[in-house]
Amino acid sequence: MEITIQERLGQRVKALRVKKGWSQEKLAELTGFHRTYIGMVERGERNISLQNIFSLSKQFGLSLEELFKDL
Amino acid sequence: MEITIQERLGQRVKALRVKKGWSQEKLAELTGFHRTYIGMVERGERNISLQNIFSLSKQFGLSLEELFKDL
DNA sequence: ATGTGACTTCAAGTCCGTG
DNA sequence: GCACGGACTTGAAGTCACA
């Protein structure tokens, strides 16, 4: 079973979040998303929209290009 | 008025499509999207999802990183 | 060959909770 | 601090007739 693009992005988001020392709740608070949604995104269960991808990348201080680097 | 991220992506998609010599209808056929949907994406009127962004990037033979380069 | 408004449908995204 | 579930509301996906 191939890993999907949303799972790959989810893993990236989780790695970045942990690196920042943030809980899912903290990232939810920073981005304005719901805490359960962050969890679903990290598990690759949600097909996130461009706007929301952009919100996450900004929170991590990354461009979209950087966010998707080697993904 | 700032240009939005979806408008920037739309312009990028259009530029890539034109460079390939494709009409919106041709790109629609290749990606499986509706012709009018392609137009709306190019005009930045749709908040496109990760899956659909990925479908477009594959059609252009680009990685997501490349698609978002300097965007 | 493309722009636009108006749809319907179903997934995105929220909010309550539990172990 | 996180995964998971049920029951919501909102918004993207996808289509069409017409200009």
Image (cartoon, coloured by chain):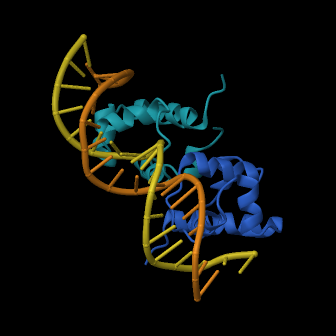
Chain colours: A cyan, B blue, C yellow, D orange
Q: Residue at x 47, y 53 (%)?
A: A54
Query: Which quarter of the figure is the C terminus of chain A placed in?
Result: top right
Q: Is B70 drawn above or below residue A7 in the view shown?
A: below
Q: Horizontal and vertical percent for residue B33?
A: 65, 56
Q: Residue at x 60, y 50 (%)?
A: B52
Residue C6's x, y, as percent? 43, 72
For image coordinates 55% across by 51% down, the residue present is: A64
Quarter occupied by the N terminus of chain A: top right
Is A22 above or below relative to B48? above
- The location of residue B66, given as percent across then percent down, is 69, 52
Does residue B55 lie above or below C1 as drawn?
A: above
Q: Position of residue A30 (x, y in %)?
A: 31, 46
Q: Quadrant of residue B10?
A: bottom right
**Front-lying residue, D2 or D7:** D7
Q: Front-most of C9 and B49?
A: C9
Q: Is residue A64 left or right of residue C16?
A: right
In the image, A18 versus A56, the foreground residue is: A56
Give the camera-side residue of A70 and B60.
B60
Q: Is residue A55 visible?
A: yes
The reply, left or right, for residue A45 in relation to residue B52 is left
How many discs mark residues in the rendered view? 0
Residue A23, placed above or below residue A68: above
Q: Is residue B15 left or right of residue B2?
A: right
Residue B62 visible here: no
Residue drawn 64% across the image and 64% down it:
B38
- Image quarter for residue A34? top left
